[in-house]
DNA sequence: CAAAATAGAATGAACGTTCATTCCGTTTTA
DNA sequence: TAAAACGGAATGAACGTTCATTCTATTTTG
């Protein structure tokens, strides 16, 4: 097994176990076992558990952004762009439930709060295209004139909730329902 | 200090600490100290930590339902009832940030998932008035014809997200913004 | 003064992390 | 080229800490 293989195995195992059991339900020993690796080996690749958690988040976020931007063009009308991003995001979560559950764990932890804070208050690129789209929409009076944060809440709050309900089996989302949910999110933010 | 006083102190301390630090960040010894009580004393009132957590949830939920139903009448028009419940709920969260943060901790844990499952699949009264309102709204074609779960997501997803952002200091919600958020939630679910 | 309640020390399980040791592919030596 | 030496990757037992829970001596109550 090559060097990066082991690292990847650790990341995969951590994603699976933390998504299922939470940060505190997934001890390093368990992650090591699932990865087919000695407990100490993890520390060759990650300084400690916090670093592993943060790095895993970074990788997931990156994957998602790449997926969202496929076929996305700032030349399209605002509503169309919104529907594209929303649909792609919801579809991604449904197709990758482990990653969704991991993100939920992350956001609902001190890591996640700190991450959002640094994202709002300062630099951090990443989801620049969301900000870009929403700011343009507000300035063109296509979206409600509300603080950006609240527009995000209106747009993504339902999306997250619906993804969770699908993944937990409380509802089954097909293409039609997905489209209708994203339309409804649009109804919430549009002027 | 009377018997029930101690119990109440334990509940209060647990609410504060778990809201701030999470279930795992609030050890029983810390809760005992904050309550001004011996560690062992907690076990006179609660069989174990899980029971304390569940009981605390029950009490918070009960308080909220009581608050929401104040001035609520099923005789009012559907939209008005929706705005009443939504506004009252968001106001409650803002006025009681510790309880809100506690609920977040609870919902994002195995407890919360199990709780929702048993609520959807079976008996459990409690928020019957939400279900009642939404079912009536759908049957009268005032709300979108979507599964009840998704309507809840559309209505409360943004509400939760906005409450969180306010409490974390990412935005400051005044009466006007609260009204506009609830209106926007209505835009999301209305036909 | 008997019984219930309380406090906090004691307990044992579980955790993240460390580290002395082993393993193994590569390089050096003769 | 065969054998020896080397170095870094990998290991997992062991450590110190933290936690929920239990135990027990003491205090409070009626």
Image (tube, coloured by chain):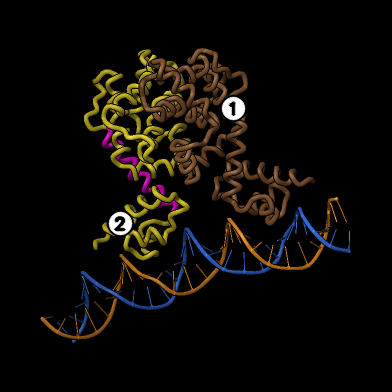
Chain colours: A yellow, B brown, C blue, D orange
Residue A38 at least partly seen: yes
Circle 2: element type: helix
Q: Position of residue B46 (x, y in %)?
A: 64, 50
Please give the residue where the numbered disc 1 appears in the rendered image: B92
Principal SS element in the magenta part?
Answer: helix
Circle 1: element type: helix
Q: Residues within 10 Å of mark 1 (few under 14, many from 20)?
A: some
Please give the residue where the numbered disc 2 appears in the rendered image: A9
The residue at the point 45 percent across, 25 percent down is B155
In the rendered picture of this protein, how many numbered marks are placed on residues? 2
Q: Chain of mark 1?
A: B
Q: Which is more toward the observer, B6 or A75?
A: B6
Q: Residues within 10 Å of mark 2 (few under 14, many from 20)?
A: some
Q: Name the side, left or right, on which B186 lies relative to A15.
A: right
Q: Chain of mark 2?
A: A
Quadrant position of residue A164: top left
Q: Position of residue B125 (x, y in %)?
A: 53, 33
Q: Which is more toward the observer, D7 or B186?
A: B186
**Label 2 close to label 1 by CB (< 8 Å):** no
Is the residue at mark 2 from the same chain as the one at mark 1? no
Q: Position of residue A44 (x, y in %)?
A: 36, 61
- In magenta stretch: residue B40: no
Specify the segment rendered in magenta. Answer: A49-68
Q: Is residue A134 above or below residue B3?
A: above
Point out the image quarter for the N terminus of chain A.
bottom left
Residue A148 at least partly seen: no
Q: Which is more toward the observer, A88 or A134?
A: A88
Which numbered circle lies on residue B169? none
The residue at the point 47 percent across, 40 percent down is B118
Point out the image quarter for the C terminus of chain A.
top left
Front disc: 2 or 1:
1
């Amino acid at each position: 097994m090559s060097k990066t293989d082991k690292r990847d195995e650790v990341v995969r195992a951590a994603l699976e176990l933390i998504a299922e059991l939470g940060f505190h339900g997934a001890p390093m020993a368990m992650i090591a076992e699932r990865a087919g690796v000695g407990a100490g080996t993890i520390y060759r690749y990650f300084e400690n558990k916090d670093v592993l958690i943060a790095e895993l988040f970074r990788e997931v976020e990156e994957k998602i952004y790449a997926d969202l931007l496929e076929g996305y063009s700032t030349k399209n009308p605002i509503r169309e762009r919104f529907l594209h991003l929303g649909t792609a995001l919801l579809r991604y979560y449904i197709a990758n439930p482990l990653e969704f559950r991991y993100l939920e764990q992350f956001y609902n932890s001190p890591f996640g709060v700190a991450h959002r804070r640094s994202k709002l208050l300062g630099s951090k690129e990443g989801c620049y295209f969301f900000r870009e789209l929403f700011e343009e929409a507000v300035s063109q009076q296509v979206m409600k004139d509300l603080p950006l944060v609240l527009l995000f809440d209106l747009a993504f709050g339902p999306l997250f909730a619906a993804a969770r309900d699908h993944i937990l089996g409380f509802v089954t989302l097909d293409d039609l329902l997905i489209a209708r949910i994203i339309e409804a999110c649009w109804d919430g933010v549009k002027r």
